[in-house]
Amino acid sequence: DQQVKQNSPSLSVQEGRISILNCDYTNSMFDYFLWYKKYPAEGPTFLISISSIKDKNEDGRFTVFLNKSAKHLSLHIVPSQPGDSAVYFCAASAEGAGSYQLTFGKGTKLSVIP
Amino acid sequence: GAGVSQSPRYKVAKRGQDVALRCDPISGHVSLFWYQQALGQGPEFLTYFQNEAQLDKSGLPSDRFFAERPEGSVSTLKIQRTQQEDSAVYLCASSLAMGGYGYTFGSGTRLTVV
């Protein structure tokens, strides 16, 4: 059973528009959420994170929103650029429960069309 | 070094062969993680070290998998009697502090068992 779900395997967006990537989780113990970006043949690169005590975190073009009651988070990229084309992974951990391991979703492949 | 280095980048093993995968973390990084990423999936946690202590090995799929970090720096993931289902990319990540937030991934070792 997947505790972190990314239901959209792929997403195509025009350059300059907003990209919205979604993630759902089932484990109520998760208290920290992260987004990673991955290019082919490279390891995942940390993008942005959010603690469960917040509902929004912004870093430049990237904003993560957390809805704890719905167990849902989303990553907004605006404006989208061709260099944003990559696979995006949502991940979660339960550090408050003493667990440092990350649980990842299956990823969403974002294609930004020039 | 500047990043997390993993070797070899690619490994082809015959079924039943033993393999050893190496991870050189960023110098001074305390935490070290191993993840397994099967094709089309997100990374899955295998094990976690804090310095030389293996604090969590709950993700190791069987007793054929063994990880060590004897001096608190370089780590080796060993897989004995490899099987086809072991084919995956094995990712190593390290972090300066306890826990994993903001940790840096290596590019991984792609293991193919034939």
Image (cartoon, grey):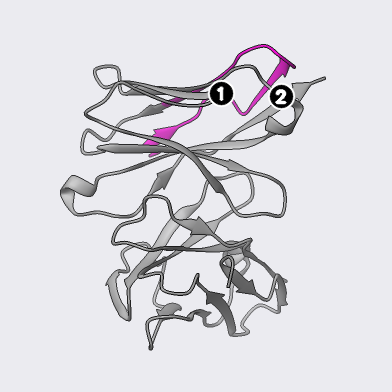
Mark 2 closeness class: few <14, some 14–19, many ≥20 residues within 10 Å: many
| SS assignment at label 1 | loop
Label 1: few (<14), some (14–19) or many (≥20) C-alpha neighbours in 10 Å? few
Residue B42: x and y in percent read 53, 45
What label does residue B16 carry, if any? none
User: Label 1 near label 2: C-beta < 8 Å?
Assistant: yes
Q: How far is disc 2 from disc 1 in space, using C-alphas?
A: 10 Å
Query: Which of B81 and B32 lies nearest the eye of the viewer?
Result: B32
* Residue found farthest to the top: A17
Residue B3, position as x, y percentages in the image: 58, 65
Please tell me whether residue B71 is drawn above or below residue B84 in the rendered image: below
Q: Are marks 2 and 1 on the same chain?
A: yes
Residue A19 on the magenta span: yes
* SS at circle 2: loop
Q: Which residue is mark 1?
A: A61
Magenta residues? A1-23
Chain letter of disc 2 in the image: A
| Residue receiving disc 2 | A81
Callout 1, which amino acid? Answer: Arg
Q: Is residue B99 above or below residue B20?
A: above
Q: Relative to A64, is B107 above or below? A: below
Q: Residue at x 55, y 82 (%)?
A: B81
> What type is the residue that disc 2 sits on?
Gln
- Residue A35 belongs to the span the image colors magenta: no
Which quadrant holds residue A39? top right
**Residue drawn at (26%, 38%) of the image:** A30
Which chain is home to disc 1? A
Locate the N terminus of chain A and report the quarter of the image it occupies: top left
Residue extending farthest to the bottom is B70
